[in-house]
């Protein structure tokens, strides 16, 4: 996903350069000369750029809000002035995204890592390494809870404490808390070699639940 967004920033950056090349100086009997770019191409680029910034930075980010404000037309000048303002916001969003300064970027990267590690857990489980699979899935689960705590400025701690703190903060309900506690118990049993306390089917369900929680809960 990160690479897709980076590629889209590059594509829209190239389109923006082409759009700027369409600028022409026009004249109005009321306001005199003004600079204008192709309005159809401009609208096309704005819609795509607004969507990209919303996905990359979040719709509550300063980048997205500033882009919306910069889209407002100025009745005393041509749309080239809007383009320059939007280009500044677009560039800032791209630099912050590619620099890793946005929490959404970290979440995307962590989600990709989680996907990779859970796939590894599936392969281990299907190959008969049930305990190793449970431990890997448990690491992903604990990392997810740490990420959720970061998003709410909660302190890290043992898994049970973070689980309880996240429920108190309203991040998820007590039913989810109980399931996470059960998943952590499988991980602990696997880590201590208590192989009679879980089965390959239990670990398979564990991996599926951790994946679902990551998709639903990560910011």
Image (tube, grey):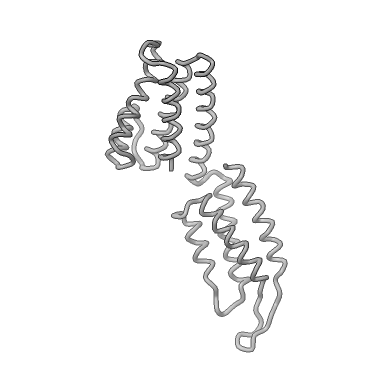
Q: Quadrant of the C terminus?
A: top left
Q: Position of residue 183 (x, y in %)?
A: 37, 25
The answer to whether residue 210 is left or right of residue 67 is left
Q: Position of residue 171 (x, y in %)?
A: 33, 41
Q: Quadrant of the N terminus?
A: top right
Determine the residue positioned at 35% across, 27% down. Answer: 159
The answer to whether residue 190 is left or right of residue 94 is left
Whether 32 is drawn above or below 151: the answer is: below
Residue closest to the eye, 10 or 184: 184
- The quarter of the picture where residue 123 lies is top right
- The quarter of the picture where residue 83 lies is bottom right
Residue closest to the eye, 145 or 44: 44
Whether 89 is drawn above or below 129: the answer is: below
Determine the residue positioned at 66% across, 82% down. Answer: 33
Residue closest to the eye, 91 or 171: 171
Q: Position of residue 131 (x, y in %)?
A: 45, 15
Whether 165 is drawn above or below 59: the answer is: above
Determine the residue positioned at 63% across, 50% down. Answer: 8
The answer to whether residue 219 is left or right of residue 172 is right
In the rendered image, the residue lying farthest to the bottom is: 29
Determine the residue positioned at 59% across, 47% down. Answer: 5
- The quarter of the picture where residue 99 lies is top right
Q: Position of residue 45 (x, y in %)?
A: 62, 61
Residue closest to the eye, 198 or 77: 198
Q: How many marks on residues?
A: 0
């Amino acid at each position: 996903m990160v690479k897709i967004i980076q590629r889209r920033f590059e594509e829209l950056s190239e389109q923006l350069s082409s759009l700027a090349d369409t600028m022409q100086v026009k004249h109005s009997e009321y306001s005199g000369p003004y600079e204008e770019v192709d309005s159809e191409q401009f609208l096309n680029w704005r819609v795509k750029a607004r969507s990209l910034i919303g996905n990359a930075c979040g719709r509550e980010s300063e980048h997205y809000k500033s882009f919306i404000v910069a889209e407002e037309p100025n009745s005393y000048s041509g749309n080239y002035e809007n383009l320059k303002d939007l280009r500044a916001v677009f560039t800032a969003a791209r630099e912050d995204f590619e620099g890793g300064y946005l929490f959404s970027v970290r979440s995307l990267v962590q989600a990709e890592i989680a996907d990779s590690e859970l796939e590894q857990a599936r392969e281990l489980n299907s190959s008969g390494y049930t305990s190793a699979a449970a431990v890997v899935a448990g690491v992903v689960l604990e990392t997810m809870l740490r990420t959720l705590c970061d998003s709410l400025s909660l302190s890290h701690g043992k898994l049970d404490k973070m689980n309880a703190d996240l429920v108190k903060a309203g991040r998820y309900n007590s039913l989810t808390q109980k399931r996470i506690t059960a998943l952590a118990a499988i991980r602990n049993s696997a880590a201590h070699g208590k192989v009679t306390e879980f089965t390959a089917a239990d670990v398979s369900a564990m991996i599926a639940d951790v994946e679902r929680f990551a998709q639903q809960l990560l910011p």
